Amino acid sequence: MSGYILELDGVCRYFGGLKAVDDVSFRMKKGEILGLIGPNGAGKTTCFNLISGVYSPTRGRITLDGVSTGGLPPYKMAALGVGRTFQVVKPFTSLSVLNNVQVALGLDRYGGVGRSLSTWNTKASSDEAMEILEEVGIASLAHTPSGQLPLGNQRRLELARALALKPKLLLLDETFSGLRHEEISLLSRLVRAVREKGISVLLIEHNMKVAMGLSDRLVVLNRGRMLAEGSPGEVRSDPKVIEAYLGKGGAGDAS
């Protein structure tokens, strides 16, 4: 069996004449934290949307744990083991923190009408959701309406909902955006703990200190194309990256 959880081979996504992702190829090892970085408009979020099934590739092949997935919708990608957070956090604000996680635990019930009508708010789902909330450090807020949470705790709830899908690949989209230093440190520890459980983590991150410090390797995109790939040290010193990204106000954060 392959040692790669995710493989992109010549993947393209075009919107009319716009080449949002153009011939991108990279492999992600199982158990790896891989950072996907690049300037605004580089194609990072489009890559996430391709991997998670929001978009189908115009051309190329995406493989998850040996299974070709290009064109599968998001709910099928979630069932295959892809969990995702979003840059703009959108919990079910009328539900409690606990109920938000319980809803995510109900994925296996959403394969048909009969299943979706079954009860999701059970003692078993409550117990399992509480375990996940303990894991991310917000169990004490279980019965708080999720709309009342500050941003840092909303991001932890978003992570909890993604973990409720029991992913083998976790996509983190700007999870550290807008957080204070102590919140970043806490969330970084949580991400490392997730990896220790055997979950592979692919993250988009504009904070270069976070991206460099957390990632085992980095893939750099620029204008939809691959610019560089390697360890944080290799990427940090790559002249093409410095010119395209780090040299535009980010070099100080990258050190």
Image: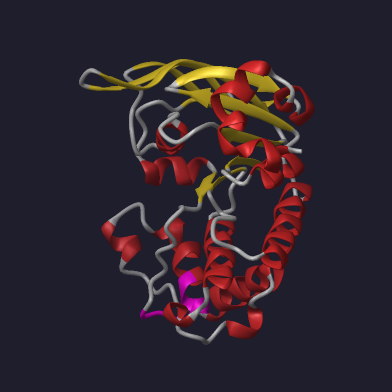
Residue 83 percent location from the top left of the image: 52, 48
Q: Residue at x 42, y 68 (%)?
A: 91
Task: Work out whether 226 lies above or below 75.
Answer: above
Q: Considering the image in quadrants, where does the C terminus appear?
A: top right
Image quadrant assignment for residue 25: top right
Residue 12: % across, % down: 38, 18
Q: Residue at x 52, y 78 (%)?
A: 98
- The correct choice, above or below, for 120 with respect to 141 in the image is above
Between 135 and 250, the one nearer to me in the picture: 250
Q: Position of residue 22 (x, y in %)?
A: 41, 16
Report if residue 163 lies within the magenta region. no
| Above or below, comparing residue 150 to residue 104 in the picture | below
Q: Give the tally of numbered discs.
A: 0
Q: Nearer the viewer, residue 44 or 108?
A: 44
Check if residue 96 falls in the magenta segment.
yes
Q: Is residue 159 left or right of residue 52?
A: right
Find the magenta span and give its range: 94-100
